[in-house]
Image (cartoon, helix red, strand yellow):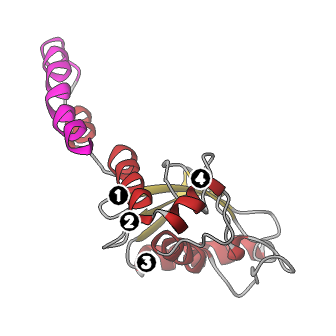
Amino acid sequence: MQRVSRLKRELQMLSTEPPPGVTCWQKEERIDDLRAQIVGGKETPYEGGIFSLEVKVPERYPFEPPAIRFLTPIYHPNIDSSGRICHDALKLPPKGAWRPSLNISTVLTSIQLLMAEPNPDDPLMADISSEFKYNKQLFVEKARKWTQEHAVQKNVGVMTDSIQNTPDQKAHKREAQPELVEPAKRNCV
């Protein structure tokens, strides 16, 4: 019961006073299954990207941290290919820093900060960490490319969602998509 009332308060705060660049909402009617989005920070390789995350709230919340993972692929030393995040705030002591006074908003904000300032000394992806430490320019190029490929919202989705599927419009929709997608692919190379 404490978990439900606290989550309702947290979700209310996230909807009325969200941290800059962070949104979080309930998925369907389940209060323990949330979705979040983090906007890539300015002057980072993730700028212009919108990254989706899954937030699973455990039964013992707030005494256990939420399980958070990226749904959007991201090139980062502290985030693996499954979207798992290596961050102290997502682990219980003694190895982690989670405590009941933290909340989903503060954890999402700290993940946003981790995106802007990776911790190469505690990586999940050793090769990306090494690249970040010893060839930062290459890391930044690859991270920008991944952001463009996976996290930048393209007008294609908006256009196809707004077109109704009548027979004449289906043909138009198929023709319109390659024209919009093609320039984006050229810009990434």
Question: In screen coordinates, is 94 left or right of 80?
Answer: right
Numbered mark located on residue 18 in the image: 3
* Place of residue 135 in the rendered image (x, y in percent of width and height, measured from the top left): 47, 62
Q: Residue 29 carries which label?
A: 4
Choose top left, top right, bottom left or bottom right for residue 104.
bottom right
Q: What residue type is labelled 4?
A: Glu
Dot 4 falls on a residue whose secondary structure is loop
Whichever of callouts 1 and 4 sits on the residue coming sooner in the sequence is: 4
- Point out the stretch of residues depicted in magenta: 165-189
187 or 8, nearer to the observer: 187
Q: What residue type is labelled 3?
A: Pro
Tell me which numbered mark, 1 or 2, is placed earlier along the sequence. Answer: 2
Instruction: Answer few, some or many: residues within 10 Å of disc 4's Cα (few below 14, many 20 plus, some between 14 and 19).
Output: few
* Nearer to the camera, 84 or 159: 84
Q: Nearer the viewer, mark 1 or mark 4?
A: 1
Identify the residue at image location x=60%, y=46%: 81
Residue 138, image quadrant: bottom left
Distance of mark 1 from mark 2, alpha carbons? 6 Å
Q: Residue at x 35, y 58 (%)?
A: 49
Q: For numbered disc 2, what is the local secondary structure? A: strand
Looking at the image, the residue that sits furthest to the front is: 134
Looking at the image, is mark 4 or mark 2 earlier in the sequence?
4
Q: Mark 1 and mark 4: span between their CA atoms?
A: 28 Å
Distance between mark 3 and mark 4 Cα atoms: 21 Å
Count residues near mark 1 (Cα–Cα under 10 Å), then give few for <14, some for 14-19, many for 20+.
many
The residue carrying mark 1 is: 49
Q: Which residue is found at the position 78% from the left and 77% from the top?
A: 96
The majority secondary structure of the magenta stretch comes to helix
